[in-house]
Image (cartoon, rainbow, N blue to C red):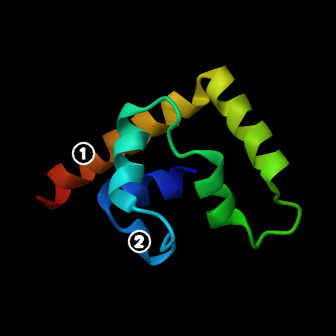
């Protein structure tokens, strides 16, 4: 999720999320409590054996309920800001 969130925020996700509008995903990720959404995560992780809509929905709900989802997104935003400063 961290990799995908960073790719969406920085605009580099289009190469592996061709079926989605990355601009809309970025807006949802940063402003909407739905965030990435299970469909995006399932599309990204779909080739991994054992990954299905039920498992993605369940794990995403766990992340959100625990507060870890918001923490991960905040960490990704901080990482991007630090890289912007570092690489100017």
Answer few, some or many: residues within 10 Å of disc 2's Cα (few below 14, many 20 plus, some between 14 and 19). Answer: some
Question: Position of 65 compared to 7: left or right?
Answer: right
| Image coordinates for residue 12, horizontal then vertical, percent | 36, 68
Question: Position of 15 compared to 42: left or right?
Answer: left
Locate residue 87: give its quadrant: bottom left
The mark nearer the N terminus, 1 or 2, is: 2
Number of residue marks? 2
Label of residue 81 in the image = 1
Q: Is residue 72 above or below residue 11?
A: above
| Image coordinates for residue 29, horizontal then vertical, percent | 43, 42
| Image coordinates for residue 61, horizontal then vertical, percent | 71, 32
- Name the quarter where the C terminus is drawn: bottom left
Which one is in front, 47 or 79? 47
Q: Is residue 67 above or below residue 19?
A: above
- Residue positioned most to the bottom: 15
Answer few, some or many: residues within 10 Å of disc 1's Cα (few below 14, many 20 plus, some between 14 and 19). Answer: few
Residue identifier under label 2: 14
User: Which residue is pictured at 58% across the width and 56% down the height?
Assistant: 40
Label of residue 39 in the image = none
- SS category of the residue bearing label 2: helix
Which one is in front, 6 or 22? 22
Cα–Cα gap, marks 1 and 2: 21 Å
- SS category of the residue bearing label 1: helix
């Amino acid at each position: 999720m961290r990799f995908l969130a960073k790719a969406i925020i920085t605009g580099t996700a289009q190469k592996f999320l061709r079926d989605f509008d990355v601009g809309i995903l970025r807006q949802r990720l940063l402003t909407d409590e739905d965030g990435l959404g299970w469909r995006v995560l399932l599309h990204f992780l779909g080739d991994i054996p054992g990954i299905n809509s039920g498992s993605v929905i369940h794990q995403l709900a766990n992340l959100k309920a625990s507060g870890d989802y918001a923490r991960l997104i905040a960490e990704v935003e901080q990482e991007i800001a630090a890289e912007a400063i570092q690489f100017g």
